[in-house]
């Protein structure tokens, strides 16, 4: 019965990291959706390039360059979020292993958790950078040179 109590306690400890894992999964969903939209937009622009005059082609090429940069930022954010999710999974697995072998893993769990947080922070920073870049290059209505403000 004592072993069941230990496993129940470990499950209780693992609940918080599992909620964190759910949050990271939601973030990954947002990031991959943004990446998919960037790729779709780039493909549409690339399909329009052949046969265009240079005065029309140059703005499209500039936009493709921005999209490529945004795509790289999203790729990095997705990579770091995936690493964070993996680290959280290692936290949960380590908690269960420690309960089975009765070995103190507090420092390992703490290190894995801190690494997961650092990875999440990095991912969110890349995401924020991509959002700033998207907003800075966003145009609606009149081209920039025709606007008064």
Image (spheres, rainbow, N blue to C red):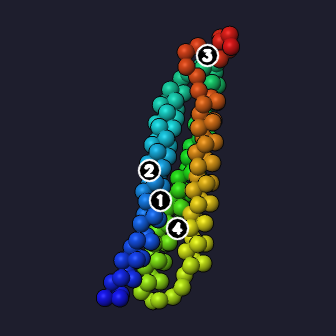
* Picture disc at residue 87: 4
**Dot 3: within a 10 Å radius of its alpha carbon, few (fewer than 14), some, or many (20 or more) residues?**
few
Q: Nearer the viewer, mark 3 or mark 1?
A: 1
Identify the residue under disc 2.
Answer: 26
Counting residues from the start of the chain, the first of labels 2 and 1 encountered is 1
Q: Secondary structure at mark 1?
A: helix
Counting residues from the start of the chain, the first of labels 4 and 3 encountered is 4
Residue occupying image coordinates x 68% and y 10%: 148
Residue 57 appears anywhere in the view:
no
> Is mark 2 in CB contact (under 8 Å) with mark 3?
no
* Residue 82 in picture, x, y percent from top left: 51, 59
* Residue 36 in picture, x, y percent from top left: 46, 42
Q: From mark 1 to mark 4, how far is it between C-alphas?
A: 11 Å
Of 10 and 113, nearer the camera is 10
Q: Quadrant of residue 100?
A: bottom left
Q: From mark 2 to mark 1, how far is it between C-alphas?
A: 10 Å
Q: From mark 2 to mark 3, how far is it between C-alphas?
A: 35 Å
Counting residues from the start of the chain, the first of labels 3 and 1 encountered is 1
Is 56 placed above or below 47 here?
Answer: above
Q: From mark 4 to mark 3, how far is it between C-alphas?
A: 46 Å
Q: Nearer the viewer, mark 2 or mark 1?
A: 1
Residue occupying image coordinates x 46% and y 54%: 23
Is 25 placed above or below 18 here?
Answer: above
Counting residues from the start of the chain, the first of labels 1 and 4 encountered is 1
Residue occupying image coordinates x 51% and y 38%: 38
Identify the residue under disc 3.
Answer: 143
Q: Quadrant of the C terminus?
A: top right
Counting residues from the start of the chain, the first of labels 4 and 2 encountered is 2
Identify the residue under disc 1.
Answer: 20
Q: From mark 3 to mark 1, how far is it between C-alphas?
A: 43 Å
């Amino acid at each position: 019965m004592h072993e069941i109590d230990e496993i129940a306690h470990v499950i209780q400890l693992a609940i918080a990291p599992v909620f964190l894992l759910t949050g990271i999964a939601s973030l990954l969903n947002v990031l991959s959706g943004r990446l998919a939209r960037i790729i779709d937009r780039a493909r549409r622009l690339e399909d329009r390039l052949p046969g265009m005059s240079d005065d029309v082609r140059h703005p499209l090429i500039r936009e493709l360059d921005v999209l490529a940069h945004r795509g790289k930022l999203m790729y990095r954010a997705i990579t770091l979020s995936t690493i964070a999710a993996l680290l959280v999974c290692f936290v949960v697995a380590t908690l269960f292993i420690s309960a089975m072998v009765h070995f103190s893993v507090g420092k390992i769990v703490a290190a894995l958790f801190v690494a997961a947080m650092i990875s999440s922070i990095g991912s969110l920073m890349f995401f924020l950078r991509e959002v700033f870049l998207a907003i800075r290059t966003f145009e609606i209505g009149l081209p920039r040179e025709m606007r008064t403000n």
